[in-house]
Image (cartoon, grey):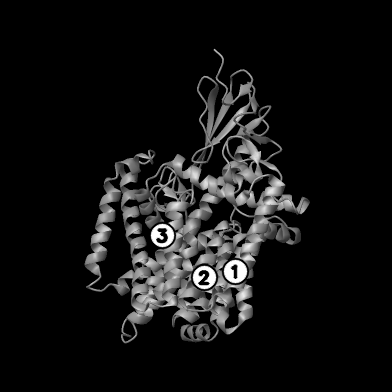
Amino acid sequence: MFEKICIWARQSPNYALVLITLVALGPFLAKPFNIDDPLFIWAGHQIQAHPLNPYGFNVAWDTTAAPMWQITDNPPLTCYYIALTAGIFGWSEIALHVAFLIPAIAVVLGTCRLAQRLCQNPMAAAMITLLGPFFLVSATSVMCDVTLLAFWIWAAVFWVEGPESPKKLAAAGLLIALAEMTKYFGVCLIPLLAAYSLARRQPIRRWGPALLIPLGVLCAYQYVTQSVYGYSLLYRAMDFASLSQNVIGFSKIQNSLIALSFAGGGMATAVFFAPLFWQKRELPTLTAAALLVAGILYFDASLWNRYGSLHGWALGAVKIQMIFWAAGGLWLLALAVSDLCRHRDADSLLLFLWVAGTFFFTAFCNWTVNARSILPMAPAVAILVARRLQSKFAEQTTGRSTGMAISLVAGGTLTLLVTRADFSAACAVRQSALETCARFGGTSDCLWFQGHWGFQFYMDPAVSAALDFEHSILKPGDLLAVPAGNTSVMTPESSRATPLDVLTFSGLEPLATWNVNAGAGFYAAVYGPVPFVFGAIPPERVSIYAWKASPETFLKPSRQ
């Protein structure tokens, strides 16, 4: 039976990949909305009411309410997709997650299609992409990252196939435009694919006009956002990234090491293939580099001082896991360099620039290192692994299938555990919001809450209100809910509020993707230097306070 399944998968790889993707993502279709999901959903609501003004509303997302165009740092194409889908199928978690299966499937199929041109084992490349932690977890959200990658990979496919069919170059140009309207990082496709064509010595007159499509769309977007909002949203995103880097204050070396950790952890399945490729002449160099990285990470006191919530065994566990994944990330970069040195052709240059460019952007240009910034390199890394498998086992067949199966199963198991942990955390956040409203929503004149992300989304607006630190007036008897580990939270002074209760929601996995007290910073490295952490994970907690000061704003000094 198993042999028949394998034969069918080889004969019908696309159907097999679609089925495997559905099986992998199916258990998580009911995942609660979390992290930045609400921003995309709220913009989708706005689009249904005002299609030409996606960001024309205010939202309390930081310490005070602000226009949405100042809060979001992404173009609105994904929000339009959500608005369209919800208009047909509704706004439930399952309906929207089912809609986002389409871009996830497109990424997997696109990786297989591109790998057919670049290696002899496209199925392996597609599976390594699918079973990577960053891809599978991101595919359980309704944010723009997997949708960007879907446009990205198919733009690359049509561009590589373009010389055989000039119409495909135009299609690639349109897909680049869609990518950059999904996420600004899509603009990077323009120099990447131009470098590929130049390396293949293709005349610019053949492919240059296709790049005018995304350039024209980008200029039009700049003009429209400047006209509607009085500010270029692309320039604003760039300003935000630069300002955030200065405020956060990580050094370039620290950002590089954190980015290595995220690259290794995010492409863990690819890293598990490393032992199959080790060669005696490469081991000394890689070992020395890994030991150097380990030494810097372990003894960099200024780095660990920034994560003040980590102490004792928790700190030691995070250090060990960060060193392991950083070594894996280092190997992935070395794999891209090695492939370029081995082949010295346009294909190897494409993969090298794809990986190195994504890493450089994440480490030095983005506002912080996070999974979403590393994700675009996943297909390129998977193809690089498949290419190395091809050269490694060109003459050696003994142990090939066994080694590949062990690596893929190990990586897939870890990926499913990480995805399950992220799912469980989102469920705990939703439960904490619903329980807070159920227990305290009708016991005072007003139930205020701090924090955002999924907690804000599931707080019942009929019985609660988001706290505006600068404008909300709290009165004696009002209640304040403060979720631990959330964003924009501040414990009230004891002279102004009395602790009333603490709601605790356990049941989290012994693994976390997002927990400041555990050092897991999947969505932003400012909260943790590794994308996910094994260990004793603190439960989700919501502290309830009773306001006792005279009517005043939260930040206003208490009267003596």
Q: Secondary structure at mark 2?
A: helix
Q: Vertically, is 69 above or below 286?
A: above
* Residue at position x 31%, y 55% in the image: 323
Residue matched to label 3: 263
Name the front one of labels 3 and 1: 1
> Is residue 100 in sight in this rendering?
no
Residue matched to label 1: 211
Type of amino acid under label 3:
Ala
Report the disc number at residue 194: 2
| First in sequence: mark 3 vs mark 2 | 2
The image shows residue 315 at horizontal and vertical percentages of 33, 45
| First in sequence: mark 3 vs mark 1 | 1
Q: Is residue 439 left or right of residue 297?
A: right
State the quadrant of the C terminus. Answer: top right
Q: Residues within 10 Å of mark 1 (few under 14, many from 20)?
A: many
Type of amino acid under label 1:
Leu
Q: Secondary structure at mark 3?
A: helix
Residue 145, quarter of the rendered image = bottom right
